[in-house]
Each structure stands twice: as C-alpha cells, then as structure tokens.
Image (tube, rainbow, N blue to C red):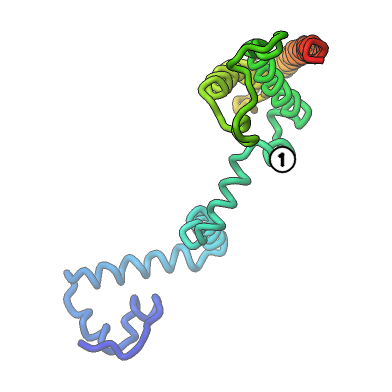
Amino acid sequence: MSWTGALTIGEFADGRHGSVGSCATNPGDPFEKYQAAYRKWERHAIGSRALTSTLQSSSNEVASKLTYQFMSNTRIMTTLALREHTVPKLFKRIAPITRCERYVTLLCVLQIAFAVQSVLFRADCLMVPKPAVCGPPANWWEKYLPTWSTLFATAVGAAFTIPGPLVLLTLFKKMPIQEMMTDREKALQRNIWRCKQCLGWVIALCVDAFVCVWLIMFAGYFGMTSS
C-alpha cells in the first residue's frame, strides 16, 4: 500500500482514496469500525449546527488552556509575575473584595512588620558615650550588608504579618453562594456581609492608627536622643 498525498478526515473515513479503499474489505478490520464510527459522528454532529457550535466552543476552551506550551520562557515568566505578584492584584477588579479593602489589607501588613521590627530595635549605639562595638565600619558599604540580626528581625516581622491578612480577608471576602435562597435568606446574608465588613474596617483602622502613633513616638524619641 502506498500513500499518494495528504488526506482529509472525510476522504480517510469514506475511503475515497484508492489505496485506503482497497484496504477496507474486511468487516472485522479496525479500519471498518473507524469508518462506521466516523460516519455516525458525521451524521449526528456535523449535520447539526448546534452540536457543531458546542463542539467548537469546547475545543476552543481546551485549546486556550494549552496555549502556554507554545509560549516562550520569557512570556511565561512575565505572565506568572503579573498574575502572582502583589502589586498587579491591587488594581484588578475582583467581585469578592474591593480595591480599597485590598489596599488597607496591604497597608496593615506593612504597618505590623514595621512595628515588630521597631520593637526588636536595639538602642545601644545611641548611648553617650557609645560602646566600642558601635564604631564606624571599615568601609562605607559594610553597613548595608545583611547580618543575623536583620535576618532574624525580618523573619519575625514576616511571621507576625501572616495573621493580619488572614483575619481581614476572612472578614472582607464575600464569596458567591451557588444555592437558591429565599428573600429572607438573602437579606440575612447581606446583613452578615455588612457586619463582617464593618468589623474588618474597624480592626484595620485601629491597627493602622496604633502603629502610626507607635512609629511616630519611636522615631521622635530616638531622633531627639541621637541629636
């Protein structure tokens, strides 16, 4: 058997090509079963526009999820960075949580991290006279190098910032409800969302106000002492 050219699906199934048609002589051959299956699909699917559009939309949906296999590494990394980074998420419209709620959640995280690091701050080098260990570094760039103290303070600050966003996001987020609800249940659910939202705003504003006052007092005290 020899192939003389590329075949379409219809030519392959109908046996219009000479070499293929000559092979379709055995009723028990898998090719005969394929022919019968294709003709049945062609009668019921291709003949119906509704089914054809359904099949086309399904295939397009699957194909859209596989397009990443044809992307370059640079495009994949750019797409992931824009999708997973915190800053782009602040401006995207999301139904369960508003932009202002996302802004105040991020602000609360930063405020808690700054407050924890200020608690761990040591003022030994602000004493008069200064201890011997507080001498100036040999090179100007050495004061920017990370140390075990800065690493520990960063880790503790990051650990203390985890509960804040979890609590605020739990109070702010309004997840869609799939089941059918009566008017009374809908009103009750809306009231629950409003109460949780108000509680989240009260917690966020109280935390931000307290940390702002704390940081102002901290900066003012050590600033006057160092002068």
Say left or right for 43 vs 204.
left
Residue at x 40%, y 64% (from the top left corner): 41
Q: Is residue 84 above or below residue 52?
A: above
- Can the viewer see residue 51 in this picture? no
Nearest to the observer: residue 116 or residue 208? 116
Snapshot quadrant of residue 57 = bottom right
Q: Is residue 155 left or right of residue 12?
A: right
Instruction: Report whether 196 appears left or right of 55.
Output: right
Identify which amino acid the numbered label 1 is placed on.
Lys
| x, y percent for residue 180 | 63, 24
Check the image and report above or below for 74 versus 202: below
Mark 1 lies on a secondary structure that is loop
Residue 68: % across, % down: 50, 56
Identify the residue shown where x is 68% and y is 29%. Answer: 96
**Which residue is at the front of the view, 29 or 116?**
116
Q: Nearer the viewer, residue 52 or 99?
A: 99
Q: Quadrant of the C terminus?
A: top right
* Foreground pick, 89 / 134: 134
- Residue ID for mark 1: 92
Near mark 1 (Cα within 10 A), the count class, few <14, some 14-19 or many ≥20, is: few
Q: Quadrant of the N terminus?
A: bottom left
Image x and y of residue 156, in percent:
55, 17
